[in-house]
Image (cartoon, grey):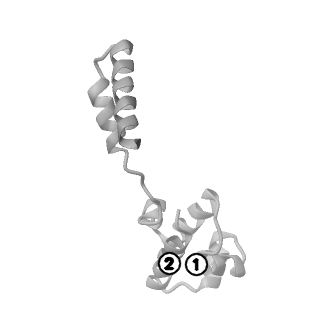
């Protein structure tokens, strides 16, 4: 998770509704200094604190986290699962053995 992106989004939402950092900190039950570090992306925050901040801002956690969470591409894993869904364990092992031989040739 990119804390800088999260902090920036929190700061933007706070500014949109005209809330001071001090008031947001108060509503979120954290210190003003801590809220400043959150907005600058210097601190990790707990889910509990994130919920309080989202509630104080009148938004959702998923909106605040949007673009701050890196999603891994699992398309290759999905392809493998699709190819092997109706295969026996023996057939799957054979496919793995073939891949190992192919990788061996690529590495040499």
Identify which residue, 86 or 2, lies in the foreground: 86
Residue at 32 percent of width and 44 percent of height: 75
Q: Are marks 1 and 2 in contact (CB under 8 Å)?
A: yes
* Residue matched to label 2: 8
Image point (40%, 41%), residue name: 108
The mark nearer the N terminus, 1 or 2, is: 2
Q: CA distance from mark 1 to mark 2?
A: 6 Å
Write down the quadrant of residue 32 in the picture. Answer: bottom right
Q: Which residue is mark 1?
A: 39
Residue 98 locus on image (x, y percent): 34, 26
Q: Left of 22 or right of it: where is 72?
A: left
* Residue 93, quarter of picture: top left
Residue 11 in the image: state x and y as whole percent: 52, 80
**Can you say whether 59 is above or below 78 in the image?**
below
The picture places residue 79, in percent across and down from the top left corner, at 29, 36
Q: Residue furthest front?
A: 108
Secondary element at tag 2? helix
Which residue: 42% across, 66% down?
A: 67
For the image shown, how many numbered marks are present on the structure?
Answer: 2
Place residue 100 in its image quadrant. Answer: top left
In the figure, is residue 46 to the left or right of 75? right
Closer to the camera in the image, 11 or 80:
80
- Could you say where residue 95 lies in the image, as x and y percent from the top left? 33, 24
Q: Residue at x 33, y 30 (%)?
A: 81
Left or right: 33 in relation to 71 = right
Label ID, residue 59: none
């Amino acid at each position: 998770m990119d804390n800088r992106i999260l902090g920036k989004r929190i700061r933007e939402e706070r500014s949109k509704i005209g809330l001071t950092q001090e008031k947001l900190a108060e509503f979120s039950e954290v210190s003003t200094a801590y809220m400043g570090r959150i907005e600058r992306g210097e601190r990790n925050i707990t889910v509990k604190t994130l919920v309080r901040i989202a509630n104080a801002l009148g938004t959702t956690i998923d909106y605040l986290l949007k673009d701050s969470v890196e999603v891994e591409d699992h398309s290759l894993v999905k392809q493998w699962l699709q190819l092997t869904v109706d295969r026996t364990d023996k057939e799957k092992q054979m496919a793995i053995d073939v891949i190992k031989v192919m990788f061996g040739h690529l590495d040499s």
